[in-house]
Every structure is written in C-alpha cells, then in structure tokens.
Image (cartoon, grey):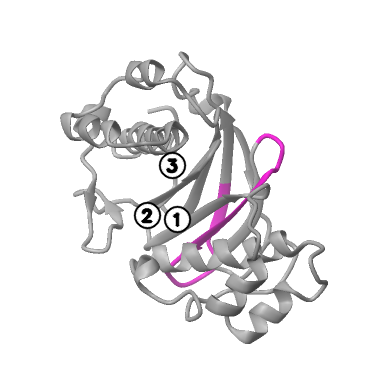
Amino acid sequence: MYMKFNPGIVHVFVLSHQPIIAWDSIIEMGGWKADDLVKMRRFLSQSALTSWAMSRMLANQLLSIFLDKPASGIEFLFSERGKPFVFEKKWFFNWSHTDGCVLLAICGFGEVGVDVESLCRSSSDFGGIARGFFTQKEADWVMAEGEAGVARRFLTLFVQKEAYLKMTGEGLSASLRSAESHLALPYHATETSRLFTCGTDSSFISAVRVAGPGMPRFSLFQSEYEVGKGIPPLTSWLESELPL
C-alpha cells in the first residue's frame, strides 16, 4: 500500500483530466472487464465515455489500495437504484464525474454521496429549473441578484442536493425539492457535509455528504491525469483538509 488510511476520515480524491481522451488511449489504461468494454462501446459521446472511464479507473485503483487487493479483483456491484458498492463492506464510497474531472470519496463509518459540476456549465434557464425543482426559499436565493451569479448559486445548491440523494441511495428517483441543502457560504455546510471548489483551476464545484454522528475530518487529495502515464502515485497528490 502507498499509505495507511484512517477509516474515521472522509478521504476525498479529485482527479482532473482532459475532457476528451481517444478510444485507443482509454483501452490502453488496461484492466477493463468484458462487461466494461460492452458498456464503453455503447457511448455515443467521446466526452461521456472519457468521464465514465476515468471514474471507473480511479475507483478501481483506489479501492484496490484501500482493500489491499489487486485491482483486477475489484468488482463493482450496484443497488436497485444504481448506487455502487463492493462486496467488502469495510469501506463506503461514491463517485461523480463531469467533463474534465472525477471525484471519489471513501470512508469507513457511513454511507457517502458526492457530486461535482463544472462552474462553466451553461443553461438558458437556471432560474426556471430552480423554481420548478427547488423549494421557494432556495429558488429565491438563486435569483436574489438577478442573472448575475445565478449559475454559481444554482450549482451551489444542486451539488449538495445530488450528493445528499446519492448518500441516501435514492438518487434522482427522489425529489430535488426534498433533498437537504444549505445556503451558507463560504463553501461548507454542516459537520457531515462539505461544499468546495476544486480542480487545477478551481473551475469545478463539489459537495460531499456523509451519514454518521460526530464531526469527521475531510481530507482532500488532488492530482491531474496525464494520458499514457496512468493514475499518479498517491504520494504525489496534493493533500489538504477541507475546512469547517
């Protein structure tokens, strides 16, 4: 193992990467199972394929370290509503990905949910989406300053809600309006959740939600993927602690 991980800490890993990686380079990452290759060939968008492949590769490599077993022996299982898990229940984990970034959180004491979105993401009607799917108070906050900053405020709430629903295992089968969120800034919410910007240029906004009592430590590891070099060794990742 590269290092010993504390099961009482929420370990958060952020890997930046090129938004589009060629098919041949993805295949050369290696370790793909037959079922993975079938899924990968179904993607119509190369950027979507890249995000999916990077999230699976990162989760596979990191869980092999946490579980102290070969990456080839890691098998992802999925709940009825799509939440990933592994047979060994020693560690809880969850992943999220968007164009150019993968986020993975692992802890040893409770279910965890994560979401990451690009702050450059565009929508013609963030306000309308907020009014349709958020509470009235949340929608009012999103539109509090008109169009100025509306995307950032919308995504501030959206990643929290998505992470909460992924933590509970409900996913988007449940209502966004019913999912907990916090309007508090700067980027933190409560003892068991964190809201933060990440990526090499802080162009992504992320949320991590974890179930369980107490006030756990959130340790953030960040790195950048270079095509052909594989996942960087964890000793080279930049580590910091997400503030309270």
Amino acid under disc 2: Gly
| Res 70 visible | no
Circle 1: residue type: Gly
Which residue is the site of mark 2?
Answer: 108
Disc 3 designates what residue? Answer: 5
Which numbered marker is on residue 178?
none
Identify the amino acid type marked 3: Phe
The answer to whether residue 147 is above or below residue 202 is: below
Badge 1 marks a residue whose secondary structure is: loop
Using the numbered discs, state the Cα–Cα distance from disc 2 to disc 1 in whole angstroms: 6 Å
- Tell me if 72 is positioned left or right of 22 in this view: left
**Which picture quadrant has residue 187?**
bottom right
- Residue found at x 66% / y 60%: 124
Quarter of image, res 112: bottom left
Determine the CA span between mark 3 and mark 2: 10 Å
- Front-most of residues 17 and 39: 39
Whether residue 206 is situated above or below residue 52 in the rendered picture? below
Magenta stretch: give its range: 200-219
The CA span between labels 3 and 1 is 9 Å
Q: Which residue is mark 1?
A: 8
Give yes or no for contact between labels 2 and 1 (Cβ–Cβ under 8 Å): yes
